[in-house]
Image (cartoon, rainbow, N blue to C red):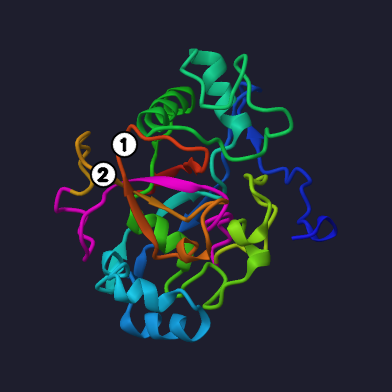
Amino acid sequence: MTSNMLPNFETNGQRKLTKRGRLPLPPMVKIPAGKFIMGTSEESIQHLYLKEEWVMDWFDADLFMSEQPQHELYLPKFEIGKYPVTNEEYHSFIWDTAHRLPKGWVGFSYPEGKENHPVVGVSMADCKKYIEWINAKTNQNYRLPSEAEWERAARWIDGRMYPWGNVFDTWRCNTLESGINNTTPVGIYSTSGDSRDEVADMVGNVWEWTCSKYVAYPYDASDGREQFDRSHKYVVRGGAWYYSRKMARCTAREGIAPDYNSPALGFRLARSLT
């Protein structure tokens, strides 16, 4: 990506304050109750094969198996963060609690100029501490999304491969192909990179924690995968700035230990609606 073709990095103005005046609240998007298509079908793999040269190697190595079988799933209505939690939002938590700093922060602050970038270098425990803190401050019920909720928000109801459709587009997300080699401010690929529900940054930029164990499909929220177990791996979604387009699909999933952190791993919030 050449310098004159970079996306607009202007502040997108997504934050709002509580009546307390200093707490930045992540904007949320409502996702209606209903059925959606989860996972990758054989037909989807065949479609990818016609567009992407890496697909046959993945198919031969059975790497699509973790995304199969494709199945239809019903979800109650919920809300999900329009963007990943940003450094500025997370900074309020650090300042108020003296919780440990994410890697790369110095002197209780994020790197200069990155206030609107996703916070990275956070483990699942760090995410949960932030959520515990913001719930206490706001009397809300924020949490991490399940991987089913994350996928529904990313791909809508029609089984699309990317938030915008079925063909990868380098200019709609921040992946290795973009050549930026770092995180980007949240929302700079909107609206062309948004999902049908207008959720931003669902693929590329940073991997995102979910609260779901990394176990086989079909997804079943009642089978124990939503119960925390420190010894188990948990699903992260979305791909990231130093991962290729292979992982920037709505169905791509990875499993990592809950105490892991990375300069390409962040999170966004979710909230149940009753």
User: Mark 1: few, some, or many residues within 10 Å (few <14, many ≥20)?
Assistant: many
Asked if residue 80 lies left or right of residue 119, the reply is left
Q: Residue furthest right?
A: 4
Q: Where is residue 146 in the image (x, y as percent from the top left)?
A: 33, 50
**Among the two numbered marks 2 and 1 on one chain, the one whose residue lies closer to the N terminus:** 2
Q: Is residue 201 above or below residue 109?
A: below
Q: In this view, does 227 lie above or below 176?
A: above
**Marks 2/1: CA distance?**
6 Å
Quarter of the image that includes the N terminus = bottom right
Please name the amino acid that badge 2 sits on.
Lys
Q: Mark 1 points at which residue?
A: 258
| Residue located 62% across and 25% down the image | 19
Q: How many marks?
A: 2
Residue 69 forms part of the magenta stretch: no
Q: Mark 2 points at which residue?
A: 233
Asked if residue 105 lies left or right of residue 76, the reply is right
Asked if residue 163 lies left or right of residue 41, the reply is right
Asked if residue 78 lies left or right of residue 162, the reply is left
* SS under mark 1: loop
Q: Are marks 2 and 1 in contact (CB under 8 Å)?
A: yes
Task: Place residue 158 in its image quadrant.
Answer: bottom left
Q: In this view, does 246 lie above or below 44?
A: above
User: Mark 2: few, some, or many residues within 10 Å (few <14, many ≥20)?
Assistant: some
- Give the magenta range: 196-224
Q: Where is residue 265 in the image (x, y as percent from the top left)?
A: 47, 42
Q: Which of 18 and 215 is in front in this view?
A: 215
